């Protein structure tokens, strides 16, 4: 069966949606049964380099693709062109779903599914989004929470709205790292997030505000903030306001190799976000055997258990400080934490997807 993947982007940024859509591409290529069985169109990518593409595709099954450089007209044209002969479109974002619907109108045997990640479907939909959602063969939600929020905003047959949890990227496998050798005796809290003014719900400011109480309970603790964005100056000023310059470090953007080392050397991972559709970054920390502190909101409670971390009320800075301080001195079992992460393995994800698309 020929399949076309539509993505906002696959390689331009390294946030959660491109990460999981790369795994969709990888799985579709592995499940394909012939040459030119899988194609893709990426809206924001300017180009796709072979070294980036190689781990997530197969030359035997991947056919044509188009990188549209943020040109929406080009994206529509490429989708209509590359959907020729396809039997299924996997659409990676609801904003692109009307284009999948249009292609299906032109090709009567073409079905399409939506991958629903999080806040982009926790809202009322536009007319064309609603029309496209009504025509979708299936909607694949990354969590039960996202499924529930989507169904609050549109009346669909619940049997067509399914949960397909995100998975660990095998390219980020932690097995080759010796965490014990890399980690330090100094307590380190790591957080990884976009530092965008539109993403303040991530709670990075709450972590900074919690640091004085954390330091009182665990002197010498460092907070490492990985990420970039237009909100960084505000967060840096917050650090200065609390006189935390010696305890809070901004690492900026780092690549996957460096990120693996950040996970390996930290004591605790924390992201007290209000609106995580799933929380893929928690899995990446757990794969390194590191406990997590998260807000009891969104999809995070579906990822983190008492064996792998602690949940706190969103926005409750004293509770966040207490949870982090306690987690820093708790005798966690890294093997048990890694076992929690393995529940979301890539092989499980691929097999789950195979059962759905071939049903």
Image: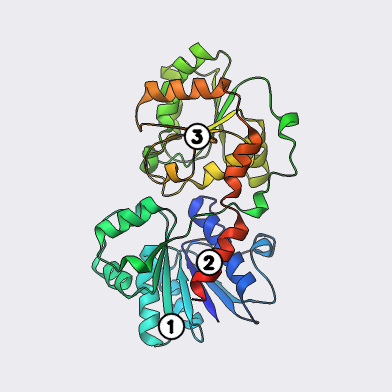
In the rendered image, the vertical position of residue 253 relative to residue 358, given as above or below: above
- List the residue tagged with mark 3: 306
Name the residue at 32% across, 69% down.
133
Tell me the number on the disc at residue 353.
2
Residue 340 percent location from the top left of the image: 57, 43
Tell me the number on the disc at residue 110.
1
Badge 3: residue crowd in 10 Å (few <14, some 14–19, many ≥20): few
* Sequence-wise first label, 1 or 3: 1
Q: CA distance from mark 2 to mark 3?
A: 28 Å
Viewer-proximal residue, 231 or 263?
A: 263
Name the residue at 29% across, 72% down.
134
Badge 1: residue crowd in 10 Å (few <14, some 14–19, many ≥20): many
Residue 144 in view (yes/no): yes
In the rendered image, the vertical position of residue 346 relative to residue 263, given as above or below: below
Q: Secondary structure at mark 2?
A: helix
* Sequence-wise first label, 1 or 2: 1
Q: Secondary structure at mark 1?
A: loop
Residue 138 picture quarter: bottom left
């Amino acid at each position: 069966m020929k399949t076309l993947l539509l993505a906002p982007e696959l390689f331009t940024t390294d946030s959660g949606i491109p990460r999981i859509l790369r795994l969709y591409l990888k799985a579709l290529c592995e499940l394909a049964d012939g040459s030119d069985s899988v194609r893709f169109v990426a809206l924001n990518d300017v180009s796709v380099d072979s070294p980036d593409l190689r781990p997530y595709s197969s030359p035997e099954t991947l056919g044509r693709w188009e990188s549209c450089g943020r040109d929406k007209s080009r994206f529509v044209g490429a989708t209509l062109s590359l959907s020729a002969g396809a039997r299924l479109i996997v659409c990676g974002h609801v904003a692109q779903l009307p284009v999948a619907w249009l292609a299906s109108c032109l090709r009567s045997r073409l079905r399409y599914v939506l991958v629903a990640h999080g806040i982009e479907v926790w809202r009322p939909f536009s007319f064309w989004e609603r029309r496209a959602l009504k025509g979708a063969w299936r909607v694949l939600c990354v969590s039960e929470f996202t499924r529930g929020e989507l169904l609050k905003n549109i009346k669909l047959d619940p049997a067509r709205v399914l949960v397909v949890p995100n998975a660990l990227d095998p390219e980020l496998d932690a097995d080759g790292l010796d965490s014990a050798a890399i980690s330090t005796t100094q307590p380190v809290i790591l957080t990884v997030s976009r530092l965008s003014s539109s993403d303040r719900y991530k709670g990075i400011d709450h972590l900074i505000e919690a640091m004085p109480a954390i330091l009182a309970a665990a002197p010498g603790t460092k907070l490492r903030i990985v990420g970039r964005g237009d909100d960084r100056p505000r967060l840096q000023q917050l650090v200065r306001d609390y006189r935390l310059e010696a305890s809070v470090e901004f690492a900026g953007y780092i690549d996957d190799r460096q990120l693996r080392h950040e996970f390996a050397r930290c004591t605790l991972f924390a992201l007290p976000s209000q609106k995580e559709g799933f929380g893929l970054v928690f899995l990446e920390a757990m794969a390194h055997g590191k406990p997590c502190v998260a807000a009891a909101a969104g999809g995070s409670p579906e990822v983190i258990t008492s064996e792998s971390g602690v949940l706190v009320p969103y926005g409750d800075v004293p509770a966040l400080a207490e949870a982090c301080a306690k987690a820093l001195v708790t005798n966690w079992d890294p093997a048990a934490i890694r076992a929690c992460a393995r529940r979301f393995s890539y092989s499980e994800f691929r097999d789950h997807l195979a059962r759905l698309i071939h049903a």
